[in-house]
Amino acid sequence: MAIESRFAACGDYAPREVVEYRGVVLPAYFAQPTQEYQVARRTAALFDRSDRAILILTGKDRSDWLHNLVTNEVKRLAAGSGCYAFAVDVRGRTQFDVNILALPDDLWLDLDAAAYEAARAHLERYLISEDVQLVDARRRFARLGCVGPRAREIAAQLGVVDFDALPALAHRALAEGAARVVRHDFAGLPGFELIAPREQAAAWWSRAVRELGVQPAGQRTLDVLRIEAGIPWLGRDIDDKVIPPETGQVERGISYRKGCYLGQEVIERMRAHGSVARRLARLSTADGSGLELPAMLRKEGQEAGRITSLVRHPREPRWIGLGYVRTKLTDLTGLTAGDPPREIAIESGAA
């Protein structure tokens, strides 16, 4: 059964259309797609982030233990900082991706809600005698996100005056409401997320809309923005066939200095040999209607990759997407997908 948004009971929460995304009912649109897109690009847009979930790690061994299970640095995280990482298996295949937030006494693992159970099971498989406890916080919090040029101004009104100086996934507790603001450009634009106790969901949404003047936008607009920014999503662009370097998220998601962790040998070997077989790329086509995803990319009748995400652009006469393209291809022209074949243009990321 689909999960209802944390904000559904709020009087200021009135989407024109809803969509079920990976088991969560989210707003598809609050306004016209073109209007939402322009608002995000020119001012600021408010997003329902109920498709995310938090798993809390406590215990004195939490940092050392998690450090050995993900691709990025965890032991060096100071309270108030964070990082993005992948959890992989012994073959280097992605099990899930995660934003890790360090607090004084625990770690918050910010996960795709649909992947929560699988992520927890993967972690518990490697919990032997360490002093680590896994706490289910899915029902504890509500979360909204704000992106756009006005995001820094809005964060300042909430009390986060050092917005521009905050690195990715740095976070601050607010003086009111037991809420926490996380610096997170989750749509490829300046942005933040606000995580608050679930019972405060309606109050925070109403404040954002009424007092701070942020216009709500839906999941389909967020999809367009993150595709334009080349940000892959778990369950769409990342699955257990993908090895992290293929996603193009090396700089923010992988540390090659941290030493051993589960699956590290495979990832290090790919770096040393430059042997990434495929890379995530931004792509476009004149007509993506009816194209069932994932869709195979072909060149001269041979498989050349696959399209994983595809959406109609709200302002331009084209469809944009993400997909994996084989790195052995030196000529990226002449790619097609579907039947009848549609021409696919590679815009960036495959080289």
Image (tube, rainbow, N blue to C red):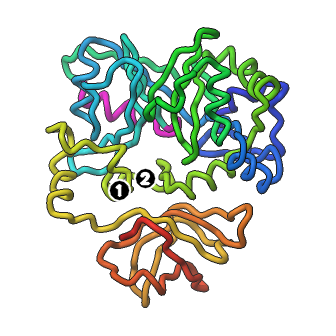
Residue at 47% across, 34% down: 111
On the rendered structure, is 108 left or right of 271?
Answer: right
Residue 255 visible from this viewpoint = yes
Q: Which residues are magenta?
A: 112-127
**Magenta segment: does it hold 119?**
yes
Q: Are marks 2 and 1 in contact (CB under 8 Å)?
A: yes
Residue at 45% across, 81% down: 298
Q: Secondary structure at mark 1?
A: loop
Residue 127 percent across, percent down from the top left? 25, 24
Nearest the viewer among 263 and 255 is: 255
Q: Disc 2 residue type? A: Ile
Which residue is tagged 2?
A: 238
Which residue is tagged 1?
A: 242
Position of 175 relative to 185 (above/below): above
**Magenta segment: does it hold 19?**
no
Whole-number angstrom distance, CA of label 2 to CA of label 1:
6 Å
Residue at 55% across, 19% down: 180
Residue 56 percent across, percent down from the top left? 42, 20
Q: Residues within 10 Å of mark 1 (few under 14, many from 20)?
A: some
Residue 23 percent across, percent down from the top left? 60, 41
Task: Identify the image quadrant of residue 277.
Answer: bottom left
Q: Main secondary structure of the magenta part?
A: helix
Q: Secondary structure at mark 2?
A: loop
Task: Identify the image quadrant of residue 55.
Answer: top left
Residue 274 percent across, percent down from the top left? 20, 64
On the rendered structure, is 275 left or right of 153?
Answer: left
